Each structure stands twice: as C-alpha cells, then as structure tokens.
Image (cartoon, rainbow, N blue to C red):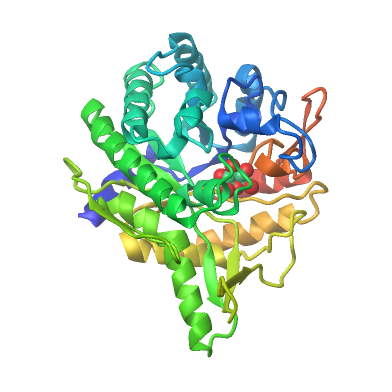
Amino acid sequence: MNLLLSGSLLATTPNSTFFWGVANSAFQVEGQPQASDWRSFTQQPGAIADGSHADFITNFWTDFEKDFALAQKLGANAFRLSIAWERIEPTPGNYDLKALDHYEKMLLSARRHGLEPIVTLHHFVLPEWLSQKGGLLEENFPQRFENYAAHVVSHLSKGPARVRWWMTFNEPNVLVRGGYMEGDWPPQKKDFNLAVQALAQLSRAHLRAVNQMRKIRSDLHIGIAQHWRVFQAKNKWNPLDQLAKWISDWCWNRQSTRSMYSGQLNLWLPGAQRVREEITINEKQLGLDYLGLNYYGRSVVSFRLKAPFIHVEEGNLTKSDIGWELYPEGMEQAIQESYKDYALPVLIAENGLADAKDQLRPNFLTSHLASLQNARNQKLPVIGYLHWTLTDNFEWHLGRKPRFGLVEVNDTTGKREPRPSFETYRKWIEAHP
Ligand code: BGC
C-alpha cells in the first residue's frame, strides 16, 4: 500500500518534478508577533542568548513578495512556510478571518512566483492563551489543534491558494526536548514524565487533525517534519555503547514518528512512565502520506556508568558557527533509515547551517546535495529538498546571532543581500531540474 501511495504522490508534484526550495517558519521571520508563548519568552531577561527578540526580523509578514522573488531567482519551485496559530485564533475559538485572508494572499503570491506552497500548521509556537491553559499538556489540546487545523485547511485548500501539501507539526522531538527535557524553551520544564505526556498529546493532535483534514479534501498530502539524526555508537565494538545508541535512536528519531504514522502510540523516555494507546485512523489507515525529514547531522553516543548513563555528543568533523558537526553522508543514511521503517516518500524539509561568513556553506551544499543524489540514484522515493533557510532569521533561544540564510539580512533595515552560496544552490538546481 505504501508503495502504491508513493507512486501516486510522485505523480502529483508539479509537472512530476522534484521539489527544489527553501523553508522558513512564521515566528522566525514574520515580525510583528502576536501574543504567544515564544513572544513572552523573548521578553524574559536572559532567556535569549544574545538578548534579541523576534519583533522585527525580515518582516516576512508584509515583505513576503521580496522573498518569493528571491526564491524564484534561485530557480526554486517550492516554498515551505508556517502559519502562526496565534494570529489565526487570538482568543479561544475565535478565528481571525483577516489573518487567514492575509495568508491566502501570501500563498497566492508564492504561486505567482512559481512556488508550490508547503504549509506547516505548527512550528514550535503556541498562542499565549493556550500556553496559559497548560499548552500541549492541556487536556483538550488535541481537540483544539484539530479545530484550528480544520479551520485553516478548509480555508486554504478549498480557496484559490489550493494548498495541497501540509505538515501538522514541525519536529515534535525538538519541541519536547526544549520545553520539557532541557527546559530552555517555553514552558521551561525539566521532567521526563511530562515530556512523554507532551509527545503523546502531539501524536493525538496529529492523528485527530489528519482524520479531519482528509474529510475536508481527499487529495491532500499530509506529513510532519521530523528532526532525524544519524546515531553512531562511539565504540562500535562496545555493546553498551551500541545499546545506548539504539535507545537514543528510538527515543529521538522513531517513537513519535511511528506513533503518528501508525496510530499506535508507544512512547517512553528513560525513567519515565510509558504511554501506550491506539487511535483509529480513518480512510487511508496511515497517519502520514509522506515524511518530512529535517536533517542536520549525526550524534555520537556512548554509555556512561553515572546517571543519566547515555552521553550524546557531536562528531569531530568540521563544525558550524554554533558547533554543529557537518556530516553530509548522513543525509543519504537518514533517507535510507526512514524509508526502511515507513516506505513513505521522503521530503528533505530542512537542511542547513549557521555560517555568518558563508565560508562553509558552498561546500556544505554541494556535499549534502551529492549525498541526496546518492539516495535518488538508489531509486529511493525522495520528492524534494528544502534548504533551511532563505534569509537570516530568529534562531529561537540563540537569538539573531546564528546566520542560517542563503541571503544575509541587515538587522535594522531588513535589507536582503544574497551570500555567495545562493549562487551555488542556484547552479545546482539549474543543473538538476
Ligand atoms: C528548526 C528550525 C531551526 C533550525 C536551525 C530546526 O530544528 O525546525 O526552526 O531554525 O532547526 O536551528
């Protein structure tokens, strides 16, 4: 069934071509933020490493045409962006039609620039009122997300923007790690039991939303963007390192993906209480039509005798401005691994690095794209590559300092200036239609 599904999906990409594009998210670029957990968090002294905020960034909210024009210049045919829930539902149950119309305008502009919109419904940020009620852990969170998703999806998939490609959640694992394990993201908890509960709520919300979205239109492509890392045992001959690696890989890459894919929730973290539950998926019986992978690198894992017993570190190859290792061959491996698990079409939904001087990015691009090409040569159903990201943005608790853009953005004027790697990516796209 999965293979049949992949066949039909492959046939529906624009002109059956590969998606080449870029990805961003609302809070990280739009500016003029509405009341949300992240807006409040940025106002807390010391919360953001460089003391910056997201009130003015590139002003994508009003200046989106500039970025779509840049993406068009790049030769892109797809653009992944997200909807800010806090704009759409500023108070519980009250939807702001003007905000939806604004997104519709934005998406129509993307289409005019030859870009297929790929829309994420939730990229880390919650409306302030919802976070005050308990956020992900609020009992009705899945129902609230379902209602919000149904509202947005009916408007934007039935209206002139005709959005067909959707993602419910971005990186459930990263969201839960920041908010409930490390506590350096809102709601700043450090409790593995709550973390498992939060993962369960995200799975429930995803599955409910998928059931609704398929009722709205049967021709939508629904996925998630999962942060997928390649895990390696520090000493491959050491069975304890191997066990630590297996646990990390399961907890990080696989458990929430599997729950959202199969409806069989089976979620656990070391020392925390397991959640097991089954949620019925109507129609297609699977909760994902394709899998978005955000690939950023590898994790080297070893066993330690002292709690928490599992130690995870970066490998020792070249590092980006924020210390993330560059590990291009992992892209091919991540695609192979996820395909082996799910047999779903794979979209590289994010891949990029912080490199203010653009010294590493050109080579980063060509090496990762070559790795992607290897996967395509093996006839794995890879349907696209979206670079993170087009313009410099707001990098969550790290603030404005990390520069992920193919295009440099002046912090005060918002002026955009393509970096040399913009040309590297443009040429690659041109050579690989
Ligand atoms: C997130 C993005 C973030 C990027 C780089 C991903 O985990 O989805 O929002 O900007 O990593 O840090």
Q: Quadrant of residue 143?
A: top left
In the image shown, does 397 or 370 lie closer to the viewer?
Answer: 397
Percent x, y for residue 430? 59, 45
Percent x, y for residue 68? 60, 27
* Left or right: 312 as drawn, with respect to 332: right
Percent x, y for residue 59? 68, 22
Quarter occupied by the N terminus: bottom left
Q: Quadrant of residue 212?
A: top left
As displayed, is residue 231 above or below residue 133?
below
Name the residue rendered at 66%, 67% in the picture: 314
In the image shown, does 11 or 399 lie closer to the viewer?
Answer: 399
In the image shown, does 116 or 312 lie closer to the viewer?
Answer: 312
In the image shown, does 395 or 216 lie closer to the viewer?
Answer: 395
Percent x, y for residue 151? 34, 21
The answer, for residue 260, to whether it is visible in the render is yes
Name the residue rendered at 75%, 38% in the picture: 400
